[in-house]
Amino acid sequence: MHLLILMPSGRTHDRITYLCLPFVAGATAWITRSPSTTIIVSLSFLAGGLMIGPDLDIHSIQYRRWGPLRWIWLPYQIAIKHRSHWSHGPIIGTALRVVYLSIWLALIALIATQTLNFFWNAQLSWQMMRAPFRTLMSKYVMEWVAVLIGLELGSISHSVSDALGSRHVQRKRRKQGQRDRRKTGSRKRSKRVSRRGR
C-alpha cells in the first residue's frame, strides 16, 4: 500500500504494474471468457506500464528500455512537457504515443524497403507492403482493440499512482507548513511573554 502513497519512482511504477497485472488479467478473463483476448490485454498492459507509458516524455526507465532505439523518443520529449495532459492524460496520452510510434515504424519500414531494393534488387513496393497491413487491420479488429485497451490500462495505472503520489506530497507540505506556522507563532508568543517578564 505504501507504494501508492509515496511519489512513485520508475522502479515503483514497475512494481505497481506487476501488482496490477493479475487483477487486469482476471477481470479480462471474467468479462471476455477468451484466453487469447486475456493474453493480448495482459501483454499490452505490461507494454503500456513498462515501455510505452507516460514517462517516455523524460529520460526515464521506460525510455532507457528502448535501448539502441531510444533516440526515436527524443523529438517526443522535446515536444511534450513532462506530466502534461498530452503525455499523462487518459486516452489522449496513449493515442498520441501509438500514433507517434506508428509513424516511426512506417519510416523504418520505408527505409528498409528502399535499402533492400537498392542493394539486393528486392523489387519491393509500398503497395505490396500495404496489402498485408490492410488485411491485418481489417481481419483482427477486436485484437487491435484489445491491444489499445491493454496499453491504456497500463498508462492509467501509471497516471493514477502519480496523482496519488502528488496529492500525498501536497498534503505533507501543507501539514509541514501548518507546523512551521505554529512553531513560529509559539516562538513569537514566548518572546512576548519573556519581554513582559522583564
Image: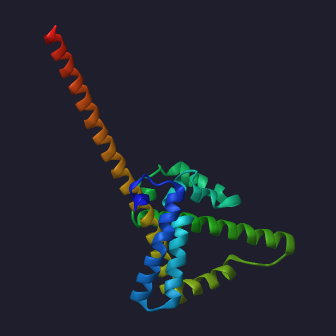
Residue at 16% from the left image edge and 17% from the top image edge:
193
Q: Would residue 19 appear left or right of 111 to someone viewing this image?
A: left
Identify whether 185 is placed above or below 29.
above
Residue 65: x, y in percent?
A: 63, 61
Identify whether 106 is placed above or below 73.
below
The quadrant of the picture occupied by the C terminus is top left
Task: Choose between 187 and 13: the one closer to the eye.
Answer: 187
Residue at 58% from the left image edge and 51% from the top image edge:
59
Residue at 13% from the left image edge and 11% from the top image edge:
196
Residue 62: x, y in percent?
A: 57, 59
The quadrant of the picture occupied by the N terminus is bottom left
Identify whether 134 is placed above or below 100.
below
Residue extending farthest to the left is 196
The reply to whether residue 88 is visible in this rendering is: yes
Q: Would residue 198 appear left or right of 143 to someone viewing this image?
A: left
Residue 86: x, y in percent?
A: 43, 57
Q: Would residue 185 appear left or right of 60 to someone viewing this image?
A: left
Residue at 75% from the left image edge and 78% from the top image edge:
124
Residue 7: x, y in percent?
A: 43, 52
